Image (spheres, rainbow, N blue to C red):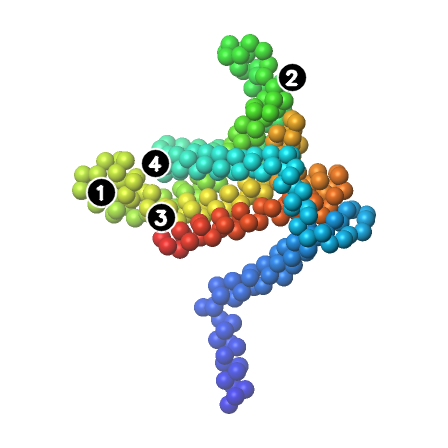
Amino acid sequence: MAVTHNSLSKTKFFSWENLPLIILLLTTLYLIVFQGITTIWSLGISTTNKTIGGNSKFIGLGNYLKLFANGTYRGAMWFTAVYAVFSVGLKLVLGFVMALALNKPIKGRAVIRALLFLPWALPTLTSVLSWRWMLGDVGGIVNHLLMTFKLIKAPVGWLGEPALAKWSVVMVNVWRGTPFFGISILAALQAIPSALYEVGDIEGANGLQKFRYITLPQSMSVVLLVTLISMIWTLGDFSVIWLMTRGGPANSTHVFSTLSYITAFQNLQLARGVAISMSILPFSILLLIVIMKQIFKK
């Protein structure tokens, strides 16, 4: 009887009803084995003076203390925050506008959706290098168009001046990431029951009131989740910055990922490079806790 009971228990556990739980357990196991081990290894390396090809010695928080005393690192930390906040904020606003527009029964909506989502579908290498060419001060189409319409008198170094380079990489990140917000929020909007808007019409609510009291609350969980995902991606973004500016000019567009790469693999200071990349971990965990608490509260 005991054998039969165990067999029935196993059969019951590996059933279709328990499939979501099984997938969740397997995913958790994967994260613990691969991500957990990698994170522990990184933390361990960051507390040494390990260099590529050299020996290592435990130095505790020495790498982190040296980093905070380094002007280039402080600049990268500041620009990482600016890059993430402005990029995600603009993507959220533009994505919401895109979703609201595409949720209307306009003619040719399917074609318009495909065109608007194209930046997200294009390979990063292709799209970012195209923008690098378009923003070039020699032969760039952006300068050519601005000069044609008499908006500027001479070519502008969009990627050659620190202030302009910062906003250029933010703009490219927004261009690439807005469709992700748009398609996610559009799915949330289409899931809102039309009866809620009918009740709003009966109560005499205008468009702004329906957006505030119906659209925004009903889609907030998706908005928060998409914002969290995009913020984590943007904080760890490497490809856009590296392909456009490589952290220049004058280290003005370095983020944690690009500075970590240069420190570890070009300057051969592996431990310090890992310490730079690990610096973002507390911010990511704090952001995850805050947003997930808001999602589950709703």
C-alpha separation, residue under disc 2 versus residue under disc 1: 55 Å
Identify the mark nearer the N-term, 3 or 1: 3
Foreground of the two, 272 or 98: 272
Q: Which residue lies under the disc numbered 2?
A: 138
For marks 4 and 3 on the same chain, the one whose residue lies earlier in the sequence: 4
Q: Secondary structure at mark 3?
A: loop
Nearer mark to the viewer, of 2 and 4: 2
Q: Residue at x 21, y 45 (%)?
A: 199
The residue shown at (21%, 38%) is 205
SS assignment at label 4: loop
- Residue 201: image x %, image y %? 21, 40
Mark earlier in primary sequence (2, 1): 2
Q: Which residue is mark 4?
A: 104
Please give left or right for residue 172 compared with residue 92 in the image: right
- Disc 1: which residue: 200
Label located before the other in sequence (3 or 2):
2
Mark 3 is surrounded, within 10 Å at the Cα level, by few (under 14), some (14 to 19) or many (20 or more) other residues, namely few
Q: Which residue is mark 3?
A: 191
Chain-order first, disc 2 or disc 4: 4
